[in-house]
Amino acid sequence: MITTLSQPVIAQRKQESLEAQSLRRVVPFSQINLIDEKTIEYNGSRIGITKDAFKSLLRLIGMSQQFADKFEKLFNADAKATFINRMKNAMSSNSGNLNNVTMVLNPISKAVVHFTKDETLKISNEQFIGLAENMINDHSMDVTNWSTDPKTGIVTINAFNPKAEVAIKGLSDEVFTGGVTFRNSPIQGFQVMPYVNRQWCTNGLTTQFAQETYQLHSLSNDNVNEFFQHMQQLRADNFVSSEFGNRVRAAAATPASISEMQYAYNAIRSHAGERTDNWIPLSENLNAYNKAGFENLNPAQAKGAKSNQSVWSVINGLTHFATHGRKIMETNMEEHQAAQMMVQAGNILGRTSFDHENYMPNVFNELRNDGAMMN
């Protein structure tokens, strides 16, 4: 049976989401003074900023993270902050083109999570919850996850319709129950993505195939009507992406690369430690390559090296830990991190091509070195 949330738990999670509503404030760009990558000074007070907020500040002044890192290596962190502030002040001067910016502040962490030129208010958590609950009720869904990220303010709700069953042609053991991931971000806004539960082990997975992912930018009549039409189409497809079956079959038939295995392993490791290999057997695979004389694979080698697991096996290891890890072992993983892990698994499945999906064998018995004779 797929575990669902009780009404008291949903009421508690709803309150947590409402309390995490991000604050937006339009301020003169010149009044923001960068101290370092983690701190700004504004109106006489020092305020923490996230990594993503620092990157968004760099984007506003047209500077890449790579350039900023190189600048710091050539000089030092203080010189980098001074240089960024000078560029910021030049852009906010009378001759510049960026007088005001919007700071997005998370009320829980008390940190800035984003800087943007956009002064338009996003859909509030209260509006998001109202729409999501209407969709959940209208489409007879049960809620499996409801989380609020205390750092980013992202609210994620996973819900499914018990009657929306989908089998994968050619894979007799693969049957899924379809649903929807509702997500509200203070930066990206309101998103709707297909969400599925694998019935064999009730693993949850959120996919982001472009044609089924919908973003609601405002609550205008046209946008809301389009949103409802999108939901009706998802329901007609049992809430499962039209590409889902093809990608599952391809994933089951394709060896995962060491690189793909490392991606899943790293997503779990900070929560499972040494037990991560129980879900993603990376150590076993690296030891095999070490014995064969391939130690410390670089990124290109890791991408080209095949593992003893299929891509589908790696995806299921990741979704199994995301769905069941907290029940199986003591872990520091919180619900919003589990929800994000389901999205990370969906990112693997949704790739245009797996590392070894279009692998071509060598049709020649041996390599020749007589090219010079042909010149």
Image: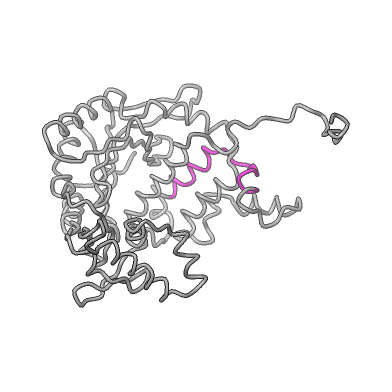
- Pinpoint residue 155: horizontal percent, then vertical percent: 25, 50
User: Could you tell me which quadrant the C terminus lies in?
Assistant: top right
Residues rendered magenta in the picture: 301-321
Color scheme of the displayed model: one colour
46 to 130, vertically: above or below: below
Frontmost residue, 260 versus 52:
52
Measuring 38% from the left and 41% from the top, which residue is drawn there?
204
- Pinpoint residue 4: horizontal percent, then vertical percent: 27, 43
Q: Quadrant of residue 274?
A: bottom right
The extreme left residue here reads: 221
Magenta highlight on residue 308:
yes
Q: Quadrant of residue 114?
A: bottom left
User: Could you tell me which quadrant the N terminus lies in?
Assistant: top left
Measuring 13% from the left and 43% from the top, which residue is drawn there?
130
The extreme front residue here reads: 95
Magenta highlight on residue 143:
no
Is residue 208 shown left or right of residue 315?
left
Is residue 178 shown left or right of residue 17?
right
Frontmost residue, 73 versus 172:
73
Measuring 23% from the left and 30% from the top, which residue is drawn there?
231
Measuring 40% from the left and 58% from the top, which residue is drawn there?
63
238 to 133, vertically: above or below: above
Secondary structure mostly seen in the magenta stretch: helix
- Pinpoint residue 14: horizontal percent, then vertical percent: 17, 52
